């Protein structure tokens, strides 16, 4: 295999990508992998200081621009899209990663926790994709399909002890939605796939490694007994965004060390 064939197969160089929630955790891991492989990467999150810090960190490896904004509502989604559209005519890769979870006892689970999670984890990916369809379509061809990657969760595949009801509903809904969108966007040469992560260290999962004893128990419940790392999240994203993953659409790929399949 020559280097150029490797680039043909797995290369994402010069592709334009947007990673939501790209300032920390899994989104930052995905954005770092894409930047280091030569993609032109935009990231977004609500906090301006977090955006600045992540942009600075990733710019050491290549192109990264952060655009602050809240994508849990249509005004925020439209504002972000307008920023992207003003800079780029084409968008090759959209990673809908931003998400939040909420845990509460089943008898007390509040309605506001339902709406907040649904707004970001289910509504956000749909309307952000909708608003960027002209750019995704403009980047797509039969030879080089555009890619939407929605980040779900192993929790949408197997129940856990987390009592995160709206999160499970939102992520399972996102998986169904992705298959529908994959079907409807197929003729536009746009792939829509889902990555369902298992455990990755992040602000969201901080309670799961709050101390050694808790972390040990959590790791014992996961088949490979380790946390996912940058290479795991970004490697799968790069595969789906490159020629190598072009024949996959409408699929859910667990990235969980076997937890949902052999765990
Ligand atoms: N970590 C895991 O083990 C795990 C497992 C399964 C699935 N996942 C999924 O992976 C994705 C990333 O999770 P994570 O663990 O990396 O979470 P995280 O560390 O909490 O990061 C979430 C990111 O989303 C941004 N964000 C939150 N609300 C937003 C909003 N309204 N608008 C725009 N950006 C917003 C956050 O930045 P700001 O606060 O600045 O907005 C941050 O950049 C989520 O969809 C999550 O459900 C994670």
Image: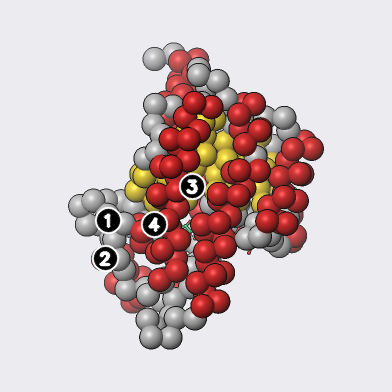
At x 40% / y 71%, what residue is drawn?
Answer: 165
Q: Residue at x 45, y 61 (%)?
A: 170
Q: Is mark 4 within 8 Å of ligand 1?
A: no
Q: Which residue is mark 4?
A: 172
Q: Nearer the viewer, residue 84 or 60?
A: 84
Q: Earlier in the sequence, mark 2 or mark 4?
A: 4
Q: Is residue 257 left or right of residue 14?
A: left
Density class for disc 4 (Cα within 10 Å; few <14, some 14-19, many ≥20) is many
Q: Is residue 79 left or right of residue 249?
A: right
Structural crowding at the residue carrying mark 1, measured as other residues with C-alpha within 10 Å and reported as few (<14), some (14–19) or many (≥20): many
Residue 197 coordinates in the image, percent (x, y): 40, 53
For the N terminus, the image quarter is top left
**Badge 2: residue crowd in 10 Å (few <14, some 14–19, many ≥20):** few
C-alpha gap between disc 1 and disc 3: 19 Å
Helix or strand or loop: what does disc 1 sit on?
Answer: loop
Q: Is the C-beta separation of discs 2 and 1 under 8 Å?
A: yes
Label 4 with label 1: CB-CB less than 8 Å: no
Mark in front: 3 vs 2: 3
- C-beta proximity under 8 Å, tags 1 and 3: no
Whether residue 63 is situated above or below residue 115 in the rendered picture = above
Determine whether, in the image, residue 126 is placed left or right of residue 40: left
Q: Return the disc, 4 or 3, that comes first in the chain's sequence.
A: 3
Disc 1: which residue: 259
Q: Quadrant of residue 252?
A: top left
Q: Identify the residue under disc 2.
A: 221
Q: Secondary structure at mark 4?
A: helix
Q: Kindly tell me whether residue 164 is visible in this rendering.
A: yes
Which is nearer the N-term, disc 3 or disc 2? 3
């Amino acid at each position: 295999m020559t280097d150029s064939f490797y680039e043909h197969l797995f290369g994402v160089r010069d592709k334009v990508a947007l990673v939501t929630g790209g300032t920390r955790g899994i989104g930052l891991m995905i954005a770092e992998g894409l930047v280091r492989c030569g993609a032109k990467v935009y990231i977004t999150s609500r906090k301006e200081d977090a955006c600045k810090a992540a942009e600075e960190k990733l710019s050491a490896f290549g192109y990264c621009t952060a655009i602050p904004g809240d994508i849990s509502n249509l005004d925020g989604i439209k504002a972000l899209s307008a920023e992207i559209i003003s800079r780029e005519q084409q968008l090759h890769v959209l990673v809908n990663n931003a998400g939040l979870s909420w845990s509460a006892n089943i008898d007390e689970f509040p309605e506001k926790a339902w709406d907040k999670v649904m707004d970001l984890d289910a509504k956000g990916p749909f309307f952000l994709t909708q608003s960027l369809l002209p750019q995704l379509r403009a980047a797509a061809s039969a030879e080089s399909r555009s890619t939407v990657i929605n980040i779900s969760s192993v929790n949408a595949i197997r129940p856990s002890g987390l009592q995160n009801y709206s999160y499970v509903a939102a992520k399972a809904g996102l998986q169904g939605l992705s298959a529908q969108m994959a079907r409807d966007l197929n003729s536009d040469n746009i792939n829509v796939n889902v990555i369902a992560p298992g455990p990755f260290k992040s602000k969201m999962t901080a309670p799961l490694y709050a101390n050694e004893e808790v972390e040990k128990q959590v790791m014992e419940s996961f088949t490979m007994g380790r946390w996912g790392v940058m290479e795991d999240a970004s490697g799968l994203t790069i595969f789906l965004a490159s020629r190598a993953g072009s024949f996959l659409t409408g699929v859910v790929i667990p990235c969980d060390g076997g937890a949902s399949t052999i765990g």
